[in-house]
Image: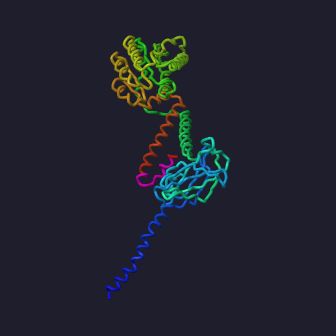
Amino acid sequence: MRAKNWLSTLILAWPLASAAENAAPELGALLAHPRPPIEVQAFDTPNDAGGSITLTWPRDPQIGENAMYQIAIADSPSGPFRVVAEVAATGNLMSEAPVLFGHGADLENQHYVNVEEFAGAGGKTPLEDGKTYYFHIDVRSAGGAIRGKVIVNAEAKGNFFNRAKFNNLVLCLVFSGLIMGYIGIARRRELKIRRIAGLEALDEALGRATEMGKPVLFIHGLRDMSQIPTIAAINILGRVARRTAEYDTALRVVAPDPVVMSVSQETVKASYVEAGRPDAFNPDHVFVASTEQFSYAAAVEGIMVRDRPAAHIMMGYFYAESLLLAETGSTTGAIQIAGTDAFTQLPFFVTTCDYTLLGEELYAASAYLSGEPRMLGSLKGQDGGKAILLAVLVLGTVLATLGWPQLTHFFSP
């Protein structure tokens, strides 16, 4: 009796299994044709200068990885529509564009695309501001393409304010406020900054040259006048020239190009006038040795050996010639004071010079030597800004380690 029931069950189940087996290809065919998105939004791309429209739609977890979204554009809802972009089923997620959409966990489930131009009769045609464009999104897969039935429209326009960079405005206001505040404090009372040994030694070096009756040699780096190290070196040159004018000491300035030479001549001349010694200024003492790196180094080394200056002051940005200059200068017995922000050359100056200005000390030299309130206030304000950034860096690292990255978002677009 049991065998009979088992046989009957097998006979009845056989057609059902065959039907399920035949239905599998039809089910696969249905899955091979994913549906186009329905919740499609089109709007002007935020924070741009115009000429761009952004489309967004939800991510479909059931769509195959090989499927593609095709975005089509037209001037009217009736068409004709042209394909302007293709997006992979797993690509162009809104979380990948924090500049446009910010930060959020839900952005991982949204696609986006920016449309800026389309193929016209005469080639690529950019989008016009103020003109309405219509879009629909199709889906193309191995089983074919399905046209989207949802049509959306939008207009492109320029944005007056880029809100993605609002954090830059906040930081600018904070740092500007610090600098202005410190300048105000410097005008009411004296601000103290730490002692820089190399600048303190300038008076000693110039005094030694005066006592020995020998010249002072000021050597520029190889950067042109548009570079910050050269500007900083010019500021130091002005202070050195004023002291040499007061002490009636000869000053030689070697420049790497005619523009730096011209600025140096005017700086030295102004310093001699301020010191009340305009007659002592000799423009021939500020000259170009060479515009080539090692020719420049050879010419300066020749001056060191022949004229035997009592003090060598090397300020600016230096390259491989730094060691040649510093070693030759050390053999003449001169006091050598160097300053550069080229960190690759600092070891050579530190080992061969008597005093070395390290990195930003070169920029702080003008404020240090002059004691002018605006310069001192700017210097202290910048130091305050750096202190804030260091504190935020430490705090952001701790919070990000604990899983709270919100603070890091403030310092990114």
Question: Residue 378 or 145: which is nearer the viewer?
Answer: 145
Name the image quarter holding residue 329.
top left
**136 versus 10 height, above or below:** above
From this view, report whether residue 182 is shown above or below residue 269. below
Q: What colour scheme has been applied to the protein in the rendered image?
A: rainbow
Residue 201 on image: x %, y %: 41, 23
Q: Residue at x 63, y 41 (%)?
A: 122
| Quadrant occupied by the N terminus | bottom left
Q: Quadrant of residue 351?
A: top left
The picture places residue 121, in percent across and down from the top left corner, at 63, 43
Percent position of residue 170, x then y? 55, 44
Look at the image and tell me whether residue 352 can be seen.
yes
Looking at the image, residue 282 sits to the left or right of residue 156; the answer is: left
Q: Is residue 409 one of those drawn in magenta?
A: yes
- Residue 50 in view: no
Which residue appears at 42% of the width and 47% of the height? 394
Nearer to us in this view, 343 or 381: 343
Q: Can you name the residue that lies furthest to the bottom here?
A: 1
Is 372 colored magenta in this rendering?
A: no
Residue 276: quarter of image: top right
Give above or below for 53 relative to 281: below
How far across and down, in percent of the image, does residue 213 sit? 41, 11
- Image check: 178 left or right of 4? right
Vertically, is 195 above or below 157? Answer: above
Residue, x 54% and y 11% (percent of image)?
279
Number of numbered tags placed on the structure image: 0
Is the stretch drawn in magenta largely helix, strand or loop? helix
Q: Which residues are magenta?
A: 399-410
- Give the camera-side residue of 80 and 258: 80
